Image (cartoon, coloured by chain):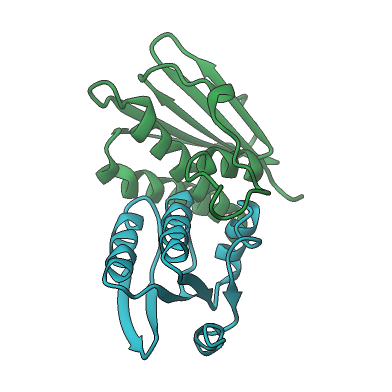
Chain colours: A green, B cyan
Amino acid sequence: MSDGAGAVRDEIVRPAHREHLPALLAFVDEATARAGVDTATAADLRLVTEEACLNVIEHGYVAMMPGPIRLRVEHGGDRVVVTLEDEAAPFDPAGVAAPDLSASWDERALGGLGWHLINTLMDEVRHERTAGGNRLTLVKRLAP
Amino acid sequence: MQITIEDRAAVTVVYITGSVDGMTAETLLGALQLQVDSGNTRLVADLSGVEYTSSAGLRAILASVKQARQRGGDFRLAAVMPPVYRVLEMSGFTSILKLYGDVDAAVASFVP
């Protein structure tokens, strides 16, 4: 992301283990607080970060030794960008079953909610395959 | 996250405080499953002390609703805070779960 005046850039790397989730989420909380993001937006960013990290932990590395999660938070002017990188198996966004929001309670599936929340809460969601893994870019535009 | 159980005659109230997330949802699900397996299928959760839930929490809630209803009971939510309500609504849960303003109302709803 190109640097604007006052851009804040932070990064953390942790093993993709559930026990490291608190550290990853605390990092996002601190980064958004330092950047002066409003409480509601900060809560949304924390939520989507949890969802994205858990997807990497539970699905990305499921068939292999857990590798790293690299988490970056960038704040520049009118937006916050959260970037997650991993070295896991290819993630196919098209392969995530969208939850059927109109299904009755006994027909509702338990899965797919995390990805749905990410796409509902963020203004832009981009996935790319990198040389060794995946990069997920989440963009939240800030109120002027 | 902390869980306290209160038996009120035919209804069991589960008081939850803290965050229901990827670290704690399994504990909540286990506690609720224990109630259902013990025959306590009329359950109310007091969520006045919960300000945050992720999809892990939603899964625990949905799984508990299914288990309770499949055994002739229900799992109803009381005093849901706005941030949690928003996530429930986004996920289409507000149309399939029963929500009440407070625990007494939720408990009373089980009386035919």
| Left or right for B56, reference B78 | left
Q: How many marks?
A: 0
Relative to the observer, which residue lies in front, A89 or A12?
A: A89
Residue A72 versus residue A141 in the image, above or below = above
| Left or right for A82, reference A26 | right
Q: Quadrant of residue B112?
A: bottom right
- Look at 32% across and 47% down and name the residue there: A23
Which residue is most to the top? Answer: A131
- Look at the image and tell me in which quarter the N terminus of chain A lies: top right
Residue B49 position in % (x across, y down) = 44, 75
Residue B44 position in % (x across, y down) = 45, 77
Which residue is most to the right? Answer: A144
- Look at 27% across and 37% down and name the residue there: A17
Residue A14 position in % (x across, y down) = 30, 34
Residue A116 versus residue A69 in the image, above or below = below
Relative to the observer, which residue lies in front, A83 or B54?
A: B54
| Left or right for A83, reference B87 | left
- Look at 51% across and 90% down and name the residue there: B104
Task: Kindly tell me whether residue A76 is visible in this rendering.
Answer: no
Residue B16 position in % (x across, y down) = 38, 73
Task: Kindly tell me whether residue A20 is visible in this rendering.
Answer: yes
